[in-house]
Image (cartoon, coloured by chain):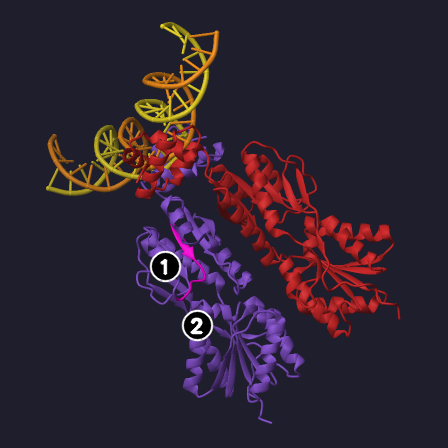
Chain colours: A purple, B red, C yellow, D orange
Amino acid sequence: MRISDVARHAGVSPSTVSYVLSGKRSISAATRERVLESIETLGYQPHAGARALASNRSNVIALVVPLRPGIHVPVAMQFAVSVVTSARDREHDVLLLTQAEGESGLRRVAGTSMVDGIIVMDVEVDDARIPTLRSLSHPSVLIGVPADTEGLTCIDLDFEAAGRACVAHLAALGHREVALIGQPPSVYERRTGFAERTVAGFEAEARERGVANTVVPCDAAPAAVTAAVTRLLRERPGLTGIVVHNEPAVAPLLEAVRGLGREVPADLSVVAIAPDDLATEVSPPLTSVSLPAEEVGGRAVSLLMDKLDDIDPPEVTLLPPRLVPRASAAARPAPS
Amino acid sequence: MRISDVARHAGVSPSTVSYVLSGKRSISAATRERVLESIETLGYQPHAGARALASNRSNVIALVVPLRPGIHVPVAMQFAVSVVTSARDREHDVLLLTQAEGESGLRRVAGTSMVDGIIVMDVEVDDARIPTLRSLSHPSVLIGVPADTEGLTCIDLDFEAAGRACVAHLAALGHREVALIGQPPSVYERRTGFAERTVAGFEAEARERGVANTVVPCDAAPAAVTAAVTRLLRERPGLTGIVVHNEPAVAPLLEAVRGLGREVPADLSVVAIAPDDLATEVSPPLTSVSLPAEEVGGRAVSLLMDKLDDIDPPEVTLLPPRLVPRASAAARPAPS
DNA sequence: CAGCGCAGTCGAAGCGCTTCGACACGCATA
DNA sequence: TATGCGTGTCGAAGCGCTTCGACTGCGCTG
């Protein structure tokens, strides 16, 4: 079943069929109709390889998914799924690359023209893959923002603003001492952009508002969370607000607070930076800055498609955070 | 940079270069050496599309990942990663398809010769995609076992044996009444193979050994787990053994048991069916049947590769479960 | 010593599509 | 009436690779 079969069936030339399919030249409505019918009847599906060879476009993009310790898999998958969905909406498929494949993987899929472009997730401040990406003739989009964005295209939630928003919200509620339960230490050690930026925003806003603050990196294991919270509340008797930027720690955190005999939000306010579904499925529902994985993934694809169309987008796109008040943050309790 | 450039550089014909690369005809060591050197120097990478067109092989396989409610994302990702890794070991890449793309997605990637074969995860007992897979001329492998396996190739852990092994272990420790904390109700409703088979094995073994038993489907939310455990322990005072086949419920389950004033394993023994990392990261470490995602993924790829090489593998491959005793199951406490 | 088979190489014919230039036709313009 | 232009279509030339058949020497065998 080839394009020439369709052409014969419709009584036109193969090039006409091709133009009907691609829309790159005008075709009379009558002819188009006839061709489309033939395609339908014959169940024609163009050969991807032939198409890629002739057009120099594979209609596939590569997605590098993170697999490191400390990343929260469900969130990573939300990104991945939204990339796949958006890509499909634009007639592209997604080739899955793992972190493990590393830079040689990027060179391979680009060098063999297997993909038209690349999306990289979980970018570090000084990411080893960036020189490789720069050297490629293929366009790429980073989810996350490295230190030097020159010539790159990056998209992410504005985590600095998110950190600020959380503190601002707590400060507005009267809180004078707050803490950030952050990502696992390993995440800071490898200098992951989003984690650092949240901390920066958190600290800056607190400083500017004269709010006392601490940052506590925290492993995801419930025991680690409990330990961190216990120590925090003991050492910081004046603490009334917590910002948590660590998905798997959210549930154990609430558990631990309760275990220490404190009520949320009566005794302690909690604001999370997390996907909405996570924030709403716990009790009490968390006041949170949502992590719009869906939108970030979609935008990443849009940006890549723009680059494929030779439109060049801004180097950095930061989505403004949206803080949704729910039930976990309230006015500061009267000091006892 | 094309194969003819390499050929010229090495002083041979393009076909010789091709044969060096594919190994499909014998080439003298000297020539091979020379060609490989030229490839190296020039940094030649063959064009994937051209290759696919000429050879009718894309060296890409499709992987359909599940995205339904109730599935545990980290485990699904373990499967996916092991598929990608194994595929790469065999010179193949992986195209990511989501459940949402459905059967038309399968038809598309097969019909356009975009992929050489398909691996489908999370197969239901009466999966809607199976007729489509049967109709395709491309080989496929299912991770999971449907009701009618005729003409298919399936691979999975032997969940029935796993269910049996858990009960057998508890029974050998003297337990006379056990319960299975299962997957969320939705998983049974859509009749997912692995969940049903575990239940079948659990019940059969209990019946054969004269052990009283119940099955409790259970949502993953901590609150739901707590509720289920509380009711279970209240309604079943003689209960001394629990089998848990629900990854996200594991931690809340232990928490809830503790909250009810029972010690694991002194008062209550717990056996899990879960990945090893999950079983060992909680306290106490769980006696468990491991869920060998790595091996299942690898085997799925092997089976698919066999089919691509026209070897036809057995319809069903079930990996025998391995129960590892750790600290969560002990002899039945003396009845009070 | 003729004949055979095999290892090693080459040339050419595709694989199925896209795209460029050319062409034919009808319509508006000069 | 002659000219130009835009629209719709076609033919043919690739895109870069694989693979088939053919050819050349060579070492053996009989």
> Callout 2, which amino acid?
Glu
The outermost residue toward the right is: B336
Label drawn at residue A130: 1
> Which comes sooner in the sequence, label 1 or label 2?
1
Same chain for the residues under marks 1 and 2 in the image: yes
Quadrant location, the C terminus of chain A: bottom right
Residue B273: percent from the left, percent from the top? 70, 56
Residues rendered magenta in the picture: A116-125
Question: Is residue A325 one of those drawn in magenta?
Answer: no
Front one among B119 and A321: B119
- The kind of secondary structure element at disc 1 is helix
The image shows residue A314, relative to residue B315, as above or below, that is below
Q: Which mark is residue A196?
A: 2
Percent position (x, y) of residue B195? 70, 52
Q: Chain of mark 2?
A: A
Q: Is residue A28 left or right of residue B173?
A: left
Q: Secondary structure at mark 2?
A: helix
Graded by Cα atoms within 10 Å as few (under 14), some (14 to 19) or many (20 or more), the crowding at tag 1 reads: some
Place residue A285 in its image quadrant. Answer: bottom right
Main structural element of the magenta stretch: helix, strand or loop?
loop
- Residue A199, by quadrant, is bottom left
